[in-house]
Amino acid sequence: MTQKTCRQCSASFEITDDDRAFLKDFGVPDPTSCPECRLRRRLLERNSRKLYWRTCDLTGERILSQFHTDHPFPVFSPEAWWSDEWDALQYGQDVDFSRPFFAQFAELRNKVPHQARFVIQGTMSNSDYVNNAGYSKNCYLIAEADYDEDCLYSNRVYHCKDAVDCFNCHQSEIIYECLDCIECHSLFFSQDCQNCSNSFFLKSCIGCSSCIGCVNQRQKKYMIFNEQFTQEEYERRKKGLRLATSSGIEDLRKRTVEFIRTQPVRYVQGEHNENSTGDHISNTRNAYFCMDCKDLEDCRYCQRVSMGVKSSMDYTFWGDNVERAYQCGACGNNVYNLKFSTMCTTNLSDCEYLDSCTGCKNCFGCVGLKKKQYCILNREYSKKEYEDLRARLILHMKNAGEYGEFFPKSMCSFSYNESIAMEYFPLTKNEALKRGYPWRDERDEKPDVKKVIAAAKLPESIAEVPDDILQWAVTSEGSGRPFRIVKQELAFYRTHNLPIPHLHPEERQDRRTALRPPRRLWKRPCSAYGRKIESTFQPSRPEIVYCEECYLAEVY
Ligand SMILES: [Zn+2]
Ligand SMILES: [Zn+2]
């Protein structure tokens, strides 16, 4: 084990023997910043929060883009970007050994067109307003999502159908305002549930149906706030809760929050894990300090990756059959041996320092390439030339302290408050700027509508809402920001008898993610017998936090 001082935040951090084995296997020098600073940097490579209107720089059409108009590089619509109408090799540069590599790479990156929205070509249908998504149809404002149908306003939904306002849900159908749920059906306003159905406001339940406001229950039916009722009594009480009205939902939301506080919480969330540490992980083996991941093997410091990831470290966002990724952000879908790269996808292997490349093998320091090999700074070489030049360049970078580091902060793809960094580690504008992260001031465009209505003035139930609402804008009860209701969304609320939400979609997303503990681990005692645990619940927090053994004794 080696103790080091983080070059970014000055905190001391460990390079453990297991880290060391990984670094040796990858053939890279020690990282100079701590795991959290490395993570923050990668989080800036994904914008799942904002889309902007701008012009496609190839076709001139008006498009929605994850990149604001002030980025230096051209931005193409996904169709134009994936087309053969342009060739990224035309931007090729020679390597200049008299200058640092990152400066040369930044010049290249500022010239090569980027994809307006990060989608996998030919896998999406009827889903124009989505980002970071693939293999989905009839979806609207979803991000970090794959294999979905009829999903709206959701982040991190995979293999879901009819998911609206959800976060981090898998294999579920008809779910609304749910987070961290797996294999659920007709579930509303619930968190950390598995295999639950026809229920409202559940927390940490498994296999429950027809329940309301329950916490830590297993295989229960007709329960309200953990109290067992007959079916008749349950139905009678359910009516009294006025679940079809906004005031009924808000009352129940408050009561549930209060009730949850009185119940023990599990120290971390996860199912089917072997020899693993982290939170919200499932189906993992030998995962160390991983968060929000599924289906991992031999991984360290990974976040938000799933669908099969092996032997990877410092890897954030996506997954889908990935092996040997190191210090990558927003890369995935059949990837092998990729280092220090961002926004790369599909059948990629043995590459380093890439931005927005797809289908490449043996490339180094390239931007926007499709199905190329033996390229450096977008210039093609013979195999032998490539190998010699690459070796020379790595030595050059090592001498400058560049090799082994992810792209510098000056090359962040997004500003701090556009990126997922804001969700994991919220900062104010001043704090972010002080730490050297870019920031973008937000401004909503004035909606072009025939009527603007304050959320508080909306009808209590969906039955009283006219079709005309599709022509209105609603001003959020929280921030006053205007938002619209779309046709597909209105139909969902009507089918499931749900009132119109009173908050702007982004505030709804923030409210959901605020329900999770911070994405950190603290050493602390179990609240029952003091066993030492590593938990996302800081010792000073008021929750009753149980270790696995005490938690299982409580729920079974
Ligand atoms: Zn640090
Ligand atoms: Zn315990």
Image: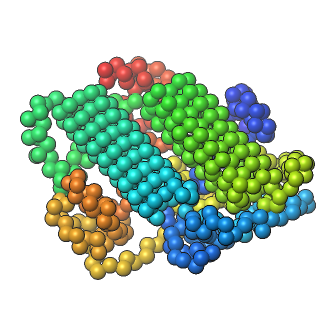
Q: For the C terminus, which image quadrant? A: top left
* Picture residue at 11% right of the left edge, 39% below the top: 235
Name the residue nearer the viewer: 385 or 422.
Answer: 385
* Picture residue at 55% right of the left edge, 23% below the top: 275
Does residue 135 appear in the picture of this structure? yes
* Picture residue at 79% right of the left edge, 37% below the top: 27
Position above or below: 537 against 433:
above
Please tell me in which quadrant of the rendered image residue 350 appears.
top right
Position above or below: 501 against 289:
below
* Picture residue at 43% right of the left edge, 62% below the top: 126
Image x and y of residue 1, in percent: 72, 28
- How many numbered marks appear? 0
Image x and y of residue 54, in percent: 54, 75
Image x and y of residue 228, in percent: 16, 29
Does residue 499 appear in the picture of this structure? no
Name the residue nearer the viewer: 327 or 549.
Answer: 327
Q: Is residue 415 left or right of residue 341?
A: left
Name the residue nearer the viewer: 366 or 48.
Answer: 366
Position above or below: 325 against 369:
above
* Rendering colour mode: rainbow
Q: Is residue 147 left or right of residue 475?
A: right
Image x and y of residue 43, in percent: 58, 51
